[in-house]
Image (tube, rainbow, N blue to C red):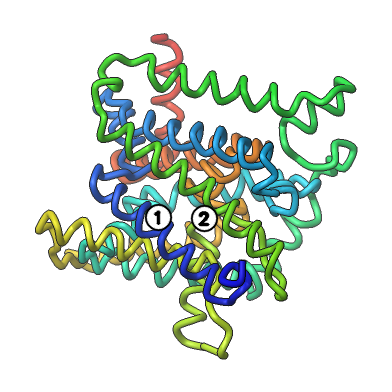
Amino acid sequence: MEFVASSWFLPLAGLVAGICMGFVARWQHFCTMSALERHWHADDSSGVRTWVLAAAVALVATQALQLAGLADTSASFYLSPNLAWTGAIIGGLAFGFGMALAGTCGFGALVRLGGGSLRSLVVLAVLGLSALSAQRGLVAQGRVEIVDRLVADLSFAGDQSLGSILSSLAGVDMRLAVAAAVAAAMLAWVFAARSYRARPGLIATGTTIGVVVAFGWLATTLAHRHSFNPVQIESASFVAPVGDTILQIVTFTGVLPDYGVGLVVGVVLGAALCAWRRRDIRWEACDDARELGRHLIGGFLMGAGGIFAMGCTIGQGISAVSVLAVSAPLAMASIVLGARMGLAYLLEGSPFAAFGGLAARFRNS
């Protein structure tokens, strides 16, 4: 355990985890924005099913690690008894809209950067700086007023996990039963499509990403137990860690990076390795000032929105799901709606056109 207690353990663990995530994501073009677009406009749900599979695997693996005493997520900010519901909604909408403008999320931008996308570098720079501003800068002043002061107190349940809330209401411990039921429902939906069951590459990608998310809880728990320094219990997220990576680059103080920074760097390296093996590295830049403007605004909305929502499509969509945080479905529903509005703005000139399409689909169903 000497290495686990060292300052090198967390950044190296994050680096290895990130390389795995970046490689498989580049290999199968795993991207939440692309998955949503194909689901809405091409009637192809394979990308969405891969994302749900990753969340289900992360849930099963994380709960198994907790049951074995190897991981302890109780100190995770996702399980705070204070539910920041306004942040999940407002931040989720902003993140989703920005994701549509940029064409990808923070994780997807890191994967694309590994393949040579300079557009993604622009997005990540703005995302990281706006995340820092929303954490501790000017934007943070607004966040305190409309998010931190309006939290819902769930301390009666101990934390905001679905299992704890239902257990408190029922008077019996239902946490494992709830986790098993949620995971079973997710897996049943994923594999209900025969066409998806015939896609081993996508299945392997979703499984790998889910396992890596669970590994994050394991690695940070081990470091927390054996390190002499304070360690944040965390897993995969790609908003605040992008800002932390920028800080590490420009203001190094002698303190080694944490797990999140190692993860960010690892995703880029893993994606670059995959792109190199496939001879798929090519430099890409914005075509004109209008496209650059979309990426700048998209990056800002994702950075600030991700901090308000306390996560992104990976942070809230997979990591928070793995601990059954009730903020996850609220934030993800808002992100999906925001992305729908962003696409409507790009394609039809108005974000409100998204509601017309949803209403028509509801009537047809």
* Residue 194 against residue 155 in the figure, above or below: above
CA distance for labels 2 and 1: 8 Å
Check disc 2 and give the amino acid type: Ser
Q: Residue 94: x, y in percent?
A: 52, 51
The one nearer the camera, 83 or 266, is 266
Q: Which residue position holds label 2?
A: 237
Q: Is residue 86 visible?
A: no
Tell whether label 1 touches label 2 (CB within 8 Å): no
Residue at 65%, 48% (x, y): give it: 71
Q: Is residue 144 visible?
A: yes
| Residue 152 found in image quarter | top right
Mark before the other along the chain sequence, 2 or 1: 1
Q: Which label was assigned to residue 107?
A: 1
- The secondary structure type at the circle numbered 1 is helix
Check disc 1 and give the amino acid type: Phe
The one nearer the camera, 302 or 207, is 207
